[in-house]
Amino acid sequence: MIEVMNLSKSFDGVPVLKDISATFKTGCTNLIIGQSGSGKTVLLKSLVGLHVPDEGQILYDSRNFTEMHRKEKKSIRQEIGMLFQGSALFDYLTVEENVRFPLDMFSGFSLEERRERANFCLKRVNLENANHLFPSEISGGMQKRVAIARAIALNPKYLFCDEPNSGLDPKTAIVIDELIQEITREYDMTTIINTHDMNSVFGIGEHIIFIAKGKKQWEGSNDEILSSENQELNDFIFASKFFRKIMSGEK
Amino acid sequence: MNFLFHMGRYALFVRRVFGKPVNHRIFFNQIAQEMEALGISSVGIVVIISFFMGAVITLQTAYNIEMPFIPKYTVGLAARDSILLEFSSTIVSLILAGKVGSHIASEIGTMRVTEQIDALDVMGINSAGFLVLPKVVALVVLNPFLVMISMGVGIFGGWIAGTSTGVVPSADYIYGIQYGFIPFYVIYSLIKAVVFAFLITTISGYWGYYASGGSLEVGRSSTKAVVVSSVQILLFNLLLTQLLLA
């Protein structure tokens, strides 16, 4: 479980996150949704320590991340897997080497064991026979799978995904969403996903936080989202003309 | 204010670069790879430039001291001292600042804008140290060798040019390059090579590491890396000359 308490962050005096408090549950997919520029990515990056919050606390299973020393943070980071928007695979490494990278750096396993684990992770994300290809030689969807395989290589307790299906076609996006949900349940992880994709919201949004202008506006599940009376949330959900037509039952 | 900001951030960056590597086996592998990418791959350009610069220095010296009272071996002596003192360390390092500096800044800058550096940080890896320290070690070790190659090739280029054009007889040139030889000139040049290698790698790494935005900014960072490295090389050349030769 990850708890965020009164988190605020500003850049050059401009507030981006304002007093955000939330609890992200273990074993389910937690979604942070909001428009572009609402502060989702800053919140996610603050959670993993890429941004230092101005105020507030972040607790990883009651361990206060914000007040930890560098060495303690380092050990928590080995419990974190992260999937970046653009996959962030290392260009100069092959698919297998990318997945093996965290194992090479931190595990005391032999090369054979590391290879075995990398192949297991690649198999888990349904990506086989691509071990020797470079990231530039595979599709966007395959890159996301490799990034997920790399994120789970060290068996993390926490998984962060920044817009995991951006740039993917709707069908592949659903496959990636479902894969993240399956892995979350299988490994009993605390998964936090940043998205503005409504398919993800209704498909895997077990616990949702809606952010607008740096503030938490709403919290609930995908079952509750349509009955929300929050105007900003409704404007966000029904922004698509296509979606409005579906909801109103038009053909 | 901007200068002070960059100076302060550069100092903090260098401190991070010298953090303890997470995995020593990977660190030594990286050093070997960087030696190939930054040093060995630069041998060709160093040889070509040194040969022609040595030849030009010799010819220009010969044409400018064409007087009966000045002995011919002076051409070899002047060419040798120019090559040992300035050309091989400073000019070769300036050329490397362009070749190696832009390579480092664009490589690290691209990793920054594609979030590969963030990925390293999230894993708990000191990204500045992981990416830049192997480059610093590789070039600091190899630059003195490149400078020594440049010295040899430059003097050889001068001999070829001098003897083939007939401006200086072979025996005079060889006597000139041996005449009044001060071994400390080589040491002085190698010290400069080490300092310049450190400047090129850390300054270029700094500009790449703090690149932001897209490909245009990576290009700008790369240009800044080359310009700032070159200016610093010239500045430190002045300081080291005053410190070591005065």
Image (tube, helix red, strand yellow):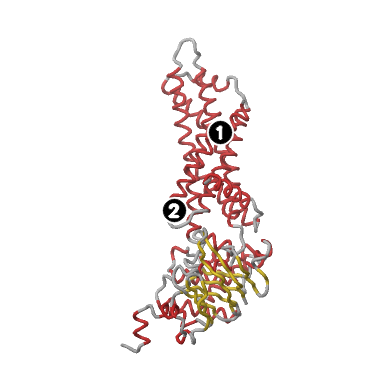
**Location of residue A7 in the rendering, given as x and y in whole percent from the top left corner:** 58, 69
**Location of residue B194 in the rendering, given as x and y in whole percent from the top left corner:** 60, 39
Of residues B220 and A221, which is closer to you in this image?
A: A221
- Looking at the rendered structure, the kind of residue marked 2 is Glu
* Residue A237, quarter of the rendered image: bottom left
Tag 2, which secondary structure?
Answer: helix
Q: Quadrant of the C terminus of chain A?
A: bottom left
Q: Which mark is residue A1?
A: none
* Residue A155, quarter of the rendered image: bottom right
Q: Is residue B65 above or below residue A125?
A: above
Crowding around mark 2 (Cα neighbors within 10 Å: few <14, some 14 to 19, many 20+) is some
**Location of residue A39 in the rendering, given as x and y in whole percent from the top left corner:** 50, 68
Of residues B177 and B117, which is closer to you in this image?
A: B117
Query: Label 1 to label 2, Cα distance in Å?
Result: 30 Å
Of residues A107 and A158, which is closer to you in this image?
A: A158
**Location of residue B216 in the rendering, given as x and y in whole percent from the top left corner:** 41, 53
Q: Chain of mark 1?
A: B
- Residue at (48% x, 78% y) in the render: A177
Q: Are marks 1 and 2 on the same chain?
A: yes
The residue that disc 1 covers is: B237
The residue that disc 2 covers is: B217
Q: Chain of mark 2?
A: B
Q: Is residue A172 above or below residue B244?
A: below
* Residue B24, quarter of the rendered image: bottom right
- Looking at the rendered structure, the kind of residue marked 1 is Asn
Q: Is residue B109 above or below residue B182?
A: below
